[in-house]
Amino acid sequence: MAVIATKKSTQSITKPKSKPVKQQQEMVIRSRFVRQPPDKIRLLCRLIKGKKITDALNILQFAHKAAAKPLILVIKEAKARGKENIEQEFFIKSLAIDEGPKLKRRRIIHRGRATTILKRMSHITIVLSDNVNPPTTRGMQSKTRNPKQITNKQNPKLRK
């Protein structure tokens, strides 16, 4: 049987003191079955993403769109819930406007025919955070040409 000797160190190991990490607070608010088409609500979402709640409400109140009304109601509800939890300003971290069910109606047209009218609904999901990261710019890549892309000038077979 082998004995393994271990040496006890006389130095005490201390961890460096780190700053206390502040927990990021997030809140999710959902509104379902809103009687507005999702594409009309999405037009306003770009305006308010990354803004403070008060700034977003000001922007939506002066937007001349009918889809601003359900967004205002959801943000006001979020503001009320946020005041219950903590007294600080929240930012809109992300917005998701999903498509809900469709009400299908019929409209009579000429010669005894009928067409379908779709009355679309939306599901609105807003994520609020107490600190915000700047929103990513999707689709804003540089407009440099791909080196493998062949144009008509470079390939004589493509010219006419």
Image (cartoon, rainbow, N blue to C red):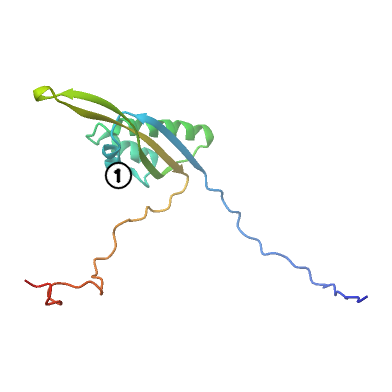
Q: Quadrant of residue 76?
A: top left
Q: Quadrant of residue 147?
A: bottom left
Q: On the picture, is 28 further left or further right than 141?
A: right
From where the camera sits, is residue 90 visible?
Answer: no
Q: Residue furthest right?
A: 1
| Secondary structure beneath label 1 | helix
Residue at 12% x, 24% y: name it: 109
Q: On the picture, is 126 further left or further right than 70?
A: right
Residue 46 pos. (x, y %): 30, 45
Residue at 69% x, 64% y: name it: 15
Return the residue at label 1: 47
Tell me the quadrant of the picture where the N terminus can be found. bottom right
Residue 31 pos. (x, y %): 40, 32
- Report the front residue among 25 and 86: 25
The correct choice, above or below, for 146 with respect to 47 in the image is below
Residue at 60% x, 57% y: name it: 19
Residue 110 pos. (x, y %): 9, 24
Please name the amino acid that badge 1 sits on. Leu
